[in-house]
Amino acid sequence: MDILKPRYVPMNRRRRIYEGKAKILFEGPEPGTLIQFFKDDATAFNKKKMEVVDGKGVLNNRISEHIFNHLNRMGIPTHFIKRLNMREQLIREVEIIPLEVVVRNLAAGTLSERLGIEEGTVLPRSIIEFYYKNDELGDPMVTEEHITAFGWASPQEIDDIMALAIRVNDFLAGLFLGAGIQLVDFKIECGRLWENDMMRVVVADEISPDSCRLWDVQTKDKLDKDRFRRDMGGIVEAYSEVARRLGILMESERPKGNGPVLVQ
């Protein structure tokens, strides 16, 4: 037995740091770490629509782990350390920058509504948008002027965030295309990771079908949270299909009442 290895503490005995719409953060086993727990809650329109979807948290945990492992190997800095079990990840504690960073490759969702562009239209180039993280205000869209004026991020941090967003977009587009999936758009959050007196901006939160719009290349079927937003049903089946195509979920398995069976 390795007495120096931090002892795993069950969830119900850990100190809760923060609870969001889809995840809970608990105190980690070592200073500077947290445990991120993925819930089965599905929410849309700033929690105006809510439902518990059995197995969603398990799938998002594994899909996000798969993507963050790739990003770390590519030298794209993230908060992710390792997966602990089917619903929990060990992550580095970061100071979250209060912005949602959305990268759009095709017109969809609010972009189509705002500008009257037909959904599915390929954009002239990838577009990066910023939204202020505030549920009470409905996460309003903001400009770089707002961000710097109100001190949410510095000009250098904005440059770092945009550089990370472009690199993540390039990687995700290729990863999903190789699985027969089109990356329409996605959202990331970033945080400040402090190492002694040095700070760097890293990718945080999660990357999963909850935070990406994913369409089947051939059929244009939606494989993401739009199935919940638009009352289409089949959200676990869609997320399971993404996991299968990425090699996370075994081909022979199908989602069951107690959640899908995943490749260890």
Image (cartoon, grey):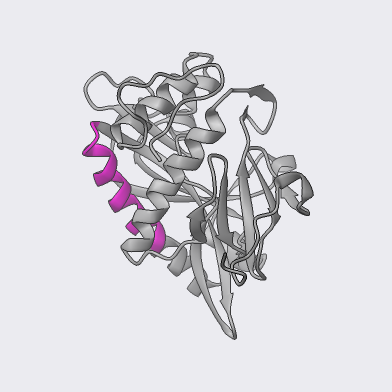
Q: Main secondary structure of the magenta part?
A: helix
Q: Residue at x 38, y 23 (%)?
A: 222
Q: Residue 206's spot in the image, x, y percent? A: 51, 47
Residue 230, position as x, y percentages in the image:
52, 18
Q: Is residue 105 above or below residue 261?
A: below
| Residue 140 pos. (x, y %) | 62, 44
The structure residue drawn at horizontal position 67% and vertical position 71%, both measured from the top left corner, is: 31
Q: Is residue 256 visible?
A: yes
**In magenta stretch: residue 246:** no
Q: Nearer the viewer, residue 27 or 29?
A: 29
**105 vs 234: above or below:** below
Rendered image quadrant of residue 185: top left
- Viewer-proximal residue among 28 and 168: 28
Residue 179 counted in the magenta span = yes
Span colored in magenta: 164-180
- Give the image quarter of residue 17: bottom right
